[in-house]
Image (cartoon, rainbow, N blue to C red):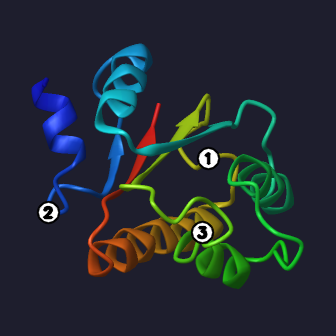
């Protein structure tokens, strides 16, 4: 098992990071670590609405997803509509600019939501990672 694969399973290290390895290396290690992966292509995201729609599609959000930040927070800390036997989660954000296509204020809110999701899943005993590539 690779060092990255072992680290992906470590609750204490899970968090929000700028990706420092090739995307293919991450993808391979996510498969080896048996974590559920979601990929978002942010190249055409230029607003809060587009960001929320892109993430809702990637995580296969249920009909109750309200396309607002409260719904995003609820969804990322829940994911109960997916297979509950998942060992953890990786959210890979591809092709985004520094603010992920959001205003500076909305980017700060999303960063807080991502960090809250990491904490929620840590309390549940599962790693939750966000990688920005």
- Real-space Cα separation, disc 3 to disc 2, in angstroms: 21 Å
Badge nearest the viewer, 1 or 2:
2
SS label for mark 1: loop
Q: Which mark is residue 79?
A: 3
What is the C-alpha distance between the residues marked 1 and 3?
Answer: 22 Å
Residue 128 screen position, x and y as percent = 37, 59
At horizontal 19% and vertical 62% (from top left) the residue drawn is: 11
Q: Nearer the viewer, residue 34 or 24?
A: 34
Mark 1 or mark 3: which comes first in sequence? 3
Decide if residue 119 is on the left or right side of residue 50: left
Could you tell me residue 82's position as x and y percent?
63, 61
Residue assigned mark 1: 100
Q: Locate residue 1: give its quadrant.
A: top left
Residue at position x 83%, y 55% in the image: 53
10 Å neighbourhood of mark 1: few (<14), some, or many (≥20)? Answer: many
- Above or below for 72 versus 86: below
Relative side of 71 to 6, left or right: right
User: Looking at the image, is 127 positioned above or below residue 133?
Assistant: below
Name the residue tied to disc 2: 12
Q: Of helix, strand and loop, which one carries label 3?
A: loop
Tag 2: Cα neighbours inside 10 Å, few (<14), some, or many (≥20)? few
Q: Earlier in the sequence, mark 3 or mark 2?
A: 2
Image height of 4 relative to 8, above or below: above
Give the Cα separation between the discs numbered 1 and 2.
25 Å
Q: Which dot, 3 or 2, sits closer to the camera?
A: 3
Q: How many callouts does the rendering have?
A: 3
Do the residues bearing badges 1 and 2 touch, measured as CB atoms within 8 Å? no
Q: Estimate the x, y position of residue 131 in percent, counting from the top left.
A: 42, 42
- Disc 1 or 2, which lies upstream in sequence? 2
């Amino acid at each position: 098992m690779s060092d990255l694969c072992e680290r992906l399973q470590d609750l204490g290290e899970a968090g929000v990071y700028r990706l420092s390895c090739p995307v293919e290396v991450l993808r391979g290690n996510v498969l080896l670590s048996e974590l559920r992966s979601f990929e978002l292509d942010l190249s055409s995201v230029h607003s809060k609405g587009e960001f929320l729609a892109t993430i809702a599609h990637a995580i296969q959000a249920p009909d109750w997803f309200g396309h607002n930040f409260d719904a995003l927070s609820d969804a990322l800390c829940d994911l109960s509509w997916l297979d509950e036997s998942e060992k953890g989660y990786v959210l890979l954000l591809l092709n985004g600019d520094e603010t992920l296509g959001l205003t500076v204020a909305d980017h700060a809110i999303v960063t807080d939501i991502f960090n809250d999701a990491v904490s929620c899943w840590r309390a549940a005993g599962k790693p939750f990672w966000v990688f920005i590539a």
